[in-house]
Each structure stands twice: as structure tokens, then as C-alpha cells.
Amino acid sequence: MKLLGKLIAGIVLGIVVGGGYYLTSDGTTAQSIMEVVARLFVTMQSVLGSFIFFLIPLIIFFFIADGISSIGTGSGKVVGATIGVAYISTVCAGLLAYFVARFIMPVVTSGGSVPEESEGIKTFLEFDIPPPMDILTALVLAFSFGIVMNILKAETMKTWVHQGKEIVEFLIERVVIPILPFYIAGVFAGMSSTGTVFKTLSVFGVVLLVAVILHWIWLVIQYTIAGSLLGKNPFKMLATMIPAYVTALGTMSSAATITVTLPKAKEAGIREKIADFVIPLGATIHLSGSTITITACSVAVMSVMPGFEIAGIGKMIGFIFLLGVVMVAAPGVPGGAIMAASGILVSQLGFSEAAVAFMIALYIAQDSFGTATNITGDAAIAGIIDKYESTLNKKDSV
């Protein structure tokens, strides 16, 4: 069963357990049994959640530090331009999502609510693993190490950081992703024990639809820019890339879709030497679709969470700029982007564990669409870099 199916099963199981506790009469044997089962689920959530949040600073440090060190100091203007354009695209996609969601989400989420952390169900034990560092410390440390490792050519440290990244990636792929359905089941068991979970779930189908529409708006914007720079019809370019989009819907992996994206990018008019470089790099660092979903869904969660209001533009701009950095280094596994972003959702927007769990469930539900948007947008990035590189060559030849 794919991850989405497992998450749905976890949500259903959590609702059944929590709902069973909520619906049984006080003092009955059935209620006592359901309370024990529900407390087991909530305890499981507490233990697994503690491990997940422990891992987040390590994800940020090792992936960003390794990404910076792998760029090198002499990689050329084209590499820097590609990274810069990918980052700008990611940030602008997030800003678009925020401004649209800021006005739409309060309307589509009207009447829904995300309950506070479970009030009726208590865990059997308190289990807390303190993270090794906070999120901003991990970001600053990653940039400091990544940049200085390049300056000093510290190959031993580069190897250590790269192997650290591989260890963390292994933990994500083999431990965190498999336990996510159980974690989500515990969260929904706690929430459904209050009887408000269905009102909450009814909101998010519309939220996901808004996110997918925003994906396509951003793709049109990207290809309009690329097409105008290259003198090509942007809609023909986008139509050429549809097979890559559809493939990514199935693979849920930008890397696994490169075999389709690369020839289609060349067919769309991107020069071979540019496509061969930008498409594989873009599959790793360009996550505009994922950023749109995370931003739009975070606004939706803030609009329905008790005691919360949608963050102002100043706070959200800071969040989106940090999110852009985190997305560049996000692990390349299904759900990797939201796992990496969880830290700044907590540190920058003050999300609770229940809110983060909702974000994870929402993100995984549309992961294939976000991935498809990421990989399809890579060809537009390649088009912009194609124009930039040809302009550089003209200047050098003068």
C-alpha cells in the first residue's frame, strides 16, 4: 500500500478509536475499554511525535550543509543563477499562495475548527526527547559549516556531513515515513475523542482543491516568463511537459521523473547542454509546488485553529523566505518537504503538534500534485537559464 493509502487508513482507524470513546456512555465497560485503546493511540502519538520533532533540526542541518558544500566555490555563474532562480521561484510561489489564501481560506474554512491538543484523553506516560538544537540554530550552523567547508576545502568534514545526510535520509525513509500513519492515527484518535473531527475534515477537501488550482496558476506564470524570454509559445511549452506532470503524479518523486522530464524539456526548446544540467539540479532544489501547498494549508490551519489568527504579511514573508531555504535542501523522499518544513511551522508560526499533524496529512494527500508541479516547473527554470547562458556567451564573445 502506498503512503497515502496508509495515511488514510491511519486517519480512519484514529477516528474509529477516538469516536468510539466519544460515543460510549460514561461508566460503562465499553467506555472503559475504548478509553484504554484511545489512550494507547495517544501515547503512541506522543512517543512517535517526540522522535519526529527530535529529527527535524538534524534534517535541516545535514541537508542544507551538504547542499551548500556540494555546490563548490568554482562552479560558475550558471550554477549560481540556477540556484538563485529556483529560490526566487520558490519564494514567489509561496507569496502568491499566501496572498490568495489570505482572502480565500477564511471563506472556505468558515465553520470548521481544529481542536486544541486532546483534552479528554491523556497519555499513559510522558515521553519527551529534546531536540539537539532549535530550528534557527540548525539553519545558521548549516550555512556556516557549508560555506566555510568550501572556503577551507575541508574534505573530511564534507564527507562527514554527506554521510550524516545519508544517515538522516535513511532514518526518514525507513523509520519516519513508515511510522507516520501510526502517528497520524494517534493524533486523530485524540481529536475525534472530542467529537469535532468531522467538522474539521470537511474543510480540507476544498483547501486541497485551492492548492492544486494555485499550482496551475504558478505553472502558467513560470512558462509565460520562460516563453517570453525564449520567444516561444508558453502554452505549447507547457503542453509538451504534460507527460512529465502525469508521470510525477504516479511516481511522487522528482528524481524518478527525470527520465521523462529531460527529453520533454529538450522537445520544448531548451538547449541540450542546459537541460542536461538544470533538470537534474532542479529536481533537487526547485520545490515551488510544495511551497504553494505548505503555505496555503498553513493559512487554512491558522484560520480554523482556536486562539489563532492568520499571520500578518511581515511574519509570513519571513516564514516563506525560510521555507524557500528549507525546500532547497528538503529530503527527496515522499513527504520529505513537509517533514523539513515542520520545524519552521513550529518556530515561526507557533504551530502545535496537532496542527503539524494536520499539515503532514494534508501535504501527503496532494504530494503527487505538488511533485508534478515541481518537476514541470523545472523546464521553465531551464528556459530562463537557457536565455541567461546565451546572453553570457554573447557578452564573452564581444
Image (tube, rainbow, N blue to C red):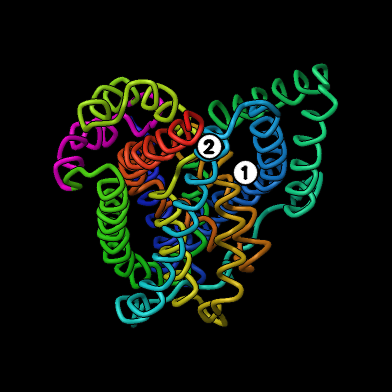
Cα distance, mark 2 to mark 1?
7 Å
Give the dominant element type of the magenta stretch: helix, strand or loop.
helix
Secondary structure of the residue carrying tag 1 is: helix
Whether residue 236 is visible here, answered yes or no, is yes
Residues at discs 2 and 1 in contact (Cβ within 8 Å): yes
Secondary structure of the residue carrying tag 2 is: helix
Q: Bounds of the magenta span?
A: 235-257
- Name the residue beneath numbered marker 2: 179
Q: Is residue 254 magenta?
A: yes
**Residue at (64% x, 29% y) in the render:** 71
Q: Amino acid at mark 1?
A: Leu
Q: Where residue 168 sits in the image (x, y, percent)? A: 66, 29
**Residue at (42% x, 70% y) in the render:** 300
Q: Where residue 162 sits in the image (x, y, percent)? A: 70, 23
- Name the residue beneath numbered marker 1: 48
Q: Is residue 187 magenta?
A: no
Are there few (<14), some (14-19), or many (20+) residues within 10 Å of tag 1? Answer: many
For the N terminus, give its image quadrant: top left
Q: Where residue 112 sits in the image (x, y, percent)? A: 37, 77
**Residue at (57% x, 34% y) in the render:** 77
Quarter of image, res 116: bottom right
Whether residue 333 is visible here, answered yes or no, is no
Examine the rendered structure and indicate whether residue 264 appears above or below residue 100. Answer: above
